[in-house]
Image: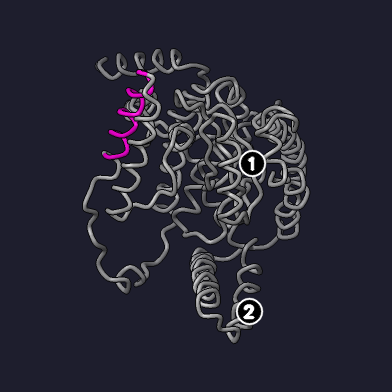
Amino acid sequence: MSWRIAAAVGSLLLLVTAVASAFVLVRGSGPSDPISKAAAPFTYDLTGWEVRHLLNRWLYKIGHLFDDGPSVKEENETIQRYFALAAEVTSLEREIAEDGDESLRSPLEEKRNEHRRLENKVEDILEKRLSTVAQDEGLTTSLPLFSNVRFVFPPLDFEFDQPPRLLVISPRDRISLDRSILLRRGLTGEQVTALEGETAATGVSSLVVNLGGIATYPSTVPEYDSYESALETAAHEWLHHYLFFHPLGSHYFDNETLRTLNETVANIGGREIAHLAQQRFPLPHSNSAAADGPREEPRIDFRAEMHELRLEVDRLLSERKIAEAEALMEQKRKFLAENSFYIRKINQAYFAFHGLYADTPASSSPIGPKMQELRRLSPSLGDFIRSVAEITSEEDLDRLLAERAVGSLTPP
C-alpha cells in the first residue's frame, strides 16, 4: 500500500502544479489591461484553495486505511442523510432570508454541523464507487516493473464545495472563447452587473457564469447537490484529470477545438460513468418525487430552440450583422423566460462558454455528433475514452471515426 500512496502523492503534486499553471494561462494577460484590471478585485484564490484542500482527503484516507468500512446499506444511509441535510439547510436558509425568523438559526447550525461531519465520508464513498466503475472499464495504469498491478490513475479525488464563477470574454463579431478569468464566490448581483458592464465597455461580449464543477485537484463539486448529479460532476472532472496524462488533455489549452474535444469527451464519459455507478450502487427509492406531485410538461423544446438560435446567430455574425444578432438573442431570452426557462443573459460570451460542450444545443460544432457516433461504434465506454485520449485534433477524430465505421462493417 505504501508505494501506491507515494506514487499517488508524487503524481498529485505534478497535477496540481499543472492545473494551477493552466489557470494562470487561462486568466490571460497581466493586470495592466482593462479587462484584467476590472476583474482583479474579484479573482479567485486558486493557490489558497489548493493549500486548504489538497491534503485534506488524503489525511482522511490514511487515517481510515485499516478500517473495515461500512456495508453498502450503511453507505447508502449516509449518502441519503447527507443530501437530505443539504436540502434542509437550503430550505432553512431560504426561510431566514425571506421571513427573517431568527429562531431558525440554531437548528440551521445544527444541521450544517452534521452535514460537515458527514462530508468526508460521503466523498470517500462516491470516490470508491466511481473508481470501481473506472477500474471495470479499464481506465487504469500500472507502475514500471509491476505491470500486473493496475490501479485507477490519477486517484479519484474531489471536494464538496461551492465552485468559483467565471468571467467569459468573446469578441462581438464572432463566437469564440478569447479569455476566461476565475472569480471568487459570493459576488453580488450588483458586482456582477458592474463587472460585465466595465469589461463590455472595452468592445467585447462579456458574461459571468456559474461553474457546475471545476477540475482543480481535488476537483470541486457543488456541495448542495444530489447523488446523481454529484456522481456525474465528479466523473466529468476526473476525466479531465485522466486526460491530462494523455495527448488530448495535455494539449487542452492549445486551441478552442482541443478544449471542445476535451469537454465533449468529459460530458459524454462523465454521464455514462455516473450512470454505471448508479446502476451498480443504486440508492433505495425515495418518495420525494411523488411528494412533489407531477411535473408540468414544458411547452417548448428548449434544446431545439437554443440550437436554432445558435445557428441563426452564427449566420448573422458571419454577415457582420452584430446588432441584429444581439437583438435576436435578447428576444429569444425573453421568449424562453415566458416559457419557464430562465437565462440571465444570452450573448456571444454565453455561446462561447456553453458551446465548448459540443453535445449541447449551445454548440454548432460538428464535434458533438461525431463524438456521439464514435461512442456508439465503440465496444465499451473504456475503449471509447482510451481511444479519444490519444487524439490531438478534429482530423484525428475523423480518422478514428472512419476506422471504427469500417470495422463495424467487417464481418466477425
Question: Taking 366 as reference, is 233 left or right?
Answer: right
Identify the residue shown where x is 61% and y is 29%.
244
Quadrant of the rendering where the C terminus is positioned: top left
* Vertical arrangement, residue 247 with respect to residue 305, above or below: above
Identify the residue shown where x is 63% and y is 83%.
106
Q: From which residue to which does the magenta span run?
A: 305-319
* Vertical arrangement, residue 40 with respect to residue 171, above or below: below
Give the number of the disc on residue 110. 2
Nearer to me, 61 or 36: 36
Q: Is residue 164 visible?
A: yes
Question: Taking 66 as reference, is 308 left or right?
Answer: left
Question: Taking 326 as reference, is 21 left or right?
Answer: right
Could you tell me the amino acid type at mark 1?
Answer: Leu
Q: Is residue 2 magenta?
A: no
Question: Taking 268 as reference, is 262 left or right?
Answer: right
Residue under numbered circle 1: 182
x and y percentages locating residue 124 in the rendered image: 61, 56
| Dot in front, 2 or 1 | 1
Q: Is residue 310 magenta?
A: yes
Q: Is residue 264 visible?
A: no
